[in-house]
Image (cartoon, rainbow, N blue to C red):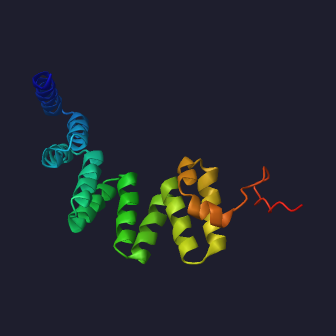
Amino acid sequence: MMREEAGDREGAEALARQAAERGNPHVLHDLALMREEAGDRKGAEALAHQAAERESTDALHSLALMRKKAGKQEDAEALARQAADLGSLPALHSLAVMREEAGHRESAEALARQAAGHGSTEALYRLAAMREEAGERQSAETLARIAADYGNHALHTLPKLLNSLWPYGLDPSGKPTPSWQP
């Protein structure tokens, strides 16, 4: 069984390389993601790099995330910046997250605002969380409402902000629900 799986993997890689040679770097990127999932970080990075060289901004972004996981923060930020400069909105959002995690709140917020301006609801939520942490409740609530209005379904995964902004939820009118009193 193991030999069959190894043969299948090698066959898939050969097909991916052929597709990439015909101008399809997305197949290489997909293969890189499979390698990463299988725990082959070095092989995943090599394939993502090859796909990025063939102008796949998704692969460049994935490579940035792989470098981040490997603890190579500067490389990760440089790659995320490069992908963002080439138009990758997810990379721009990731760069904002990386800057925030590195303690550079001002640049993180500027990048998140840029991503939000290009339509990233995740970045809107990130901005709302930053505003809440800074004690700017009104601004945080406004940004969270905008993100929710645009359909950011990830909001429910981050209850801390939502519970602090709307501990009793929202009424159908969109106003915060007051606490129930007997």
Q: Residue at point 16% right, 27% down?
A: 12
In the picture shown, does residue 49 fall above or below 140? above
Q: Residue furthest right?
A: 182
**In the rendered image, is residue 119 in sight?**
no
Q: Is residue 43 left or right of residue 73?
A: left
Query: Residue 51 appears at what percent x and percent y?
Result: 19, 43
**Horizontal arrangement in the rendering, residue 103 relative to residue 167 (left or right):** left
Number of numbered discs: 0
Q: Position of residue 163 (x, y in %)?
A: 64, 62
The residue that appears at 22% across and 44% down in the rendered structure is 36
Point out residue 147 in the picture as x, y percentages from the top left corner. Answer: 59, 55
Tell me the quarter of the image containing the C terminus: bottom right
Q: Is residue 21 above or below residue 123?
A: above
Q: Could you tell me which residue is drawn at 62 percent across and 71 percent down?
A: 139
Q: Image quarter for residue 21?
A: top left
Taking depth in this image into account, of 63 and 178 the one nearest to the observer is 178
**Residue occupying image coordinates x 13% and y 21%:** 4
- Residue 145 visible in rendering: yes
Left or right of 151 on screen, residue 82 = left
Front residue of 39/173: it is 39
Residue 166 x, y percent position in the rendering: 69, 62
> In the rendered image, which quarter contains the N terminus?
top left
